[in-house]
Amino acid sequence: MGHDILVDMPPENEKSARVQISPVSPGAEDTKMHIGRRRTDPLKSTSREVGYDGEQNTLNTLGKMYTRIRDFNVITRNIIYIVPVAILLAIPLVIFATAAKEARAGGVRLLGLFIWIQVMWWSFWLTKAIAQTMPFIFQFLVGFVSSGTRKYRLLIKAMEIPIAFMLWTIVSYFTVPLITVFDQEKHNRVQWVRTFQRFLLASVAVAALFVAQKLIVQLITVNYHRRQFNARVNDSKLKVRMLDGLLEASLKMFPLNTHPFEREDFEIMTGIDAAQQEISSTKVVGGLAMYTELLQSTVGNITSEITGARSKQSSVIHNLVVEALESKRSSRALGARLWQSFVMEGKDALFRSDVEEILGEARKEEANEIFNLLDQDNNGDVSLDEMVMATLEISRERKAIAASMHDVGQAVRVLDRFLFLVALILLGIVYAAFFSESFAKYMFTIGTQLAAISFAIATTVQEFLGSCIFVFVKHPYDVGDMVVINDVRMIVEHISLLYSTFKRVDNSRMIQIPNIINNNNWIDNVTRSKQMKEQIDISVNAETSFADIEVFKMELATFLALDENKRDFHNDVELQITQCKDLKQIDMTIGVSHKSNWANEELRLTRRNKLMTAILSCLRCVPIYPVGSDKPLAIHRPTKEIVEAAREAVIADQEALKVLKETLIESDQDESTEIGVSSSVNTLGLNVQVAESRRHSRASMESRRSASNTRHNIGVRRAGQAPDGLE
């Protein structure tokens, strides 16, 4: 219908711009003998088509020449369409102008009729050309006044056919006198000419009606996309460009398919889990060999490249980033590669100075912008988890924008069809009003019948209009958003004009709710929210003092300020005593601010569990008593003096055991006693040795496991290592 005019960044459709090369995945050596290798001949495949009867339709030499001329440019294509028909229409003109001058139809010379037909044929293409040039004329003229109105050029371009049809009907109406140009005295007396002119005047009104219908649809589309998607699309493009710059710098320091990023590069290229497929370094090298030559030729020193090579490099890197963002696995691998290549060796966080050092002084402003986008919690550094979450969020947002645009496009098409149906009904009324002089007499009867019908379809019309307002005006959610409706957490799966489909978070059930019902509901959009605050209600014993409550508040604030929690929560705690019920309990509300919203359910649950256990631990440490209990809800920790006394007692027991062993060995007792004691001592020594061996073995295993787990959680960039030529 031509209404999707502002969808300028469909994330799912960018595959056409990527480099179409298939990597050699594991198992390719086993399957390459089971696929065909014959290639099709492009010349032969385009010249032969199979007809409906199964025979091949082969283009001959004349057909090939016609195809080449037609596809040469726009001018030759239009000449092929216009000139042959104009020549055919000129034959009757020549005949009626020479051999049959007096040939008439309904009292009018046929020469004038065919002159009008010839004019109509040329005016059809002329009005079409005018409609095609109107967007450029509008942009040229209005662009001097305000650059913000240039976007409406797309609106005029989408309405090319309705505008051309309306202009053509106007020209047709005003050129009707050409039919009677040789019969001026009969101009107002020929009945069929007058009827035909009235028909053309009605056609002008109908054409204007369809232009208005299309204009309404296009204005809704333009305003909707500008309000809902323009900011999201621009933000998504900015983040993708950020990843482009980071990947460019990363590839300059650690070229593709080099240590230690073989596995990450494989997952970025293919989206396949390298560990699950048991890919060795040799297989990874072989699988990425074809990519190495391509990217090494484009990702090199910028100072040694010409402008065209620079453009090619940016295009290849951008396509690589876009392809990686299409799956979760490759998005995680991309985030891990960028973070590890930027972080200094042995460090566990990315700092602003690292980004500035790598990008150089010339791009310091860009480095600050990139770091601000990554550091969402504003704590001054970026961890590996934050980097991976950032790439996953960019991937999710691109897919959500594409899905939302598709669903809204479907809704606009439904609205367009409905308005087209209304326009068809009005079309019949317009033609009836122009051709029937007594039509006005029946308008009262027709109006009465329409009023009776309106009572039967009132509910449907109300639902339709309410749904249109809900989707295009209010639009409280997009596809992929997490919303809360009637205290139920759900994820938006599909948006139609009359209904929306959701997936419940708690049980993954699919729910379809009419938009007219949601129009009257309170809808909390979690995804569109910024940093959210969580409030937890607890009840404690009425004997709890104000000092204990303040100590509890400080303990919880101390917990939130820890290094492992500063990325998740703000360290300010809001504590409010809401009420005291029957003087038996104190109801308190604890408010803690998260550093993100709750759109990620898994992350929200992890943080909430951590917070709940911390609250319980702080209550035990104060201690604070539960409601209706005389015993404290507390686990008393031993004091420092008790711990030191216990440690000294253990040391004393060990010294006593050592003295006992030496005494027993040196003493000269009887053989049975000596054997018994020796056996006990040896057993004790053996047990100590076994315990020590097990402890060292366990420590060694834990050390290896910790090293394995932290191999990907620390940087690999060495001091002074930065890409050359980035400035």
Image: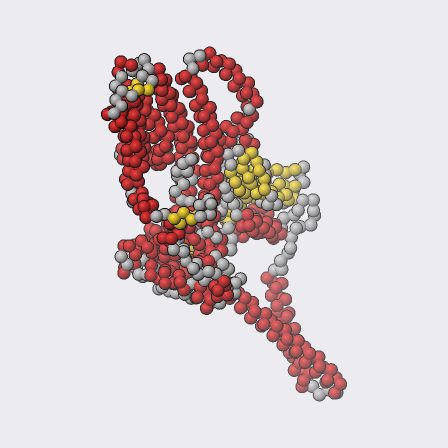
Residue 32: x %, y % from top left:
47, 63
The residue shown at (38%, 50%) is 46
**On-image quarter of the C terminus:** bottom left
Answer yes or no: is residue 147 visible: no
The residue shown at (64%, 44%) is 540
Residue 495: x %, y % from top left:
51, 38
Answer yes or no: is residue 92 visible: yes
Q: Is residue 531 above or below residue 200?
A: below
The residue shown at (31%, 26%) is 117
| Most foreground residue, 58 or 712 | 58
Q: Is residue 281 above or below residue 336?
A: below
In the picture, residue 99 is in which quadrant?
top left
**On-image quarter of the N terminus:** top left
| Most foreground residue, 640 or 694 | 694
In the picture, residue 382 is in which quadrant?
bottom left
In the picture, residue 87 is in which quadrant?
top left
Residue 545: x %, y % from top left:
61, 45
The residue shown at (38%, 23%) is 203
Q: Locate residue 62 relative to residue 585 in the image: left or right.
A: left
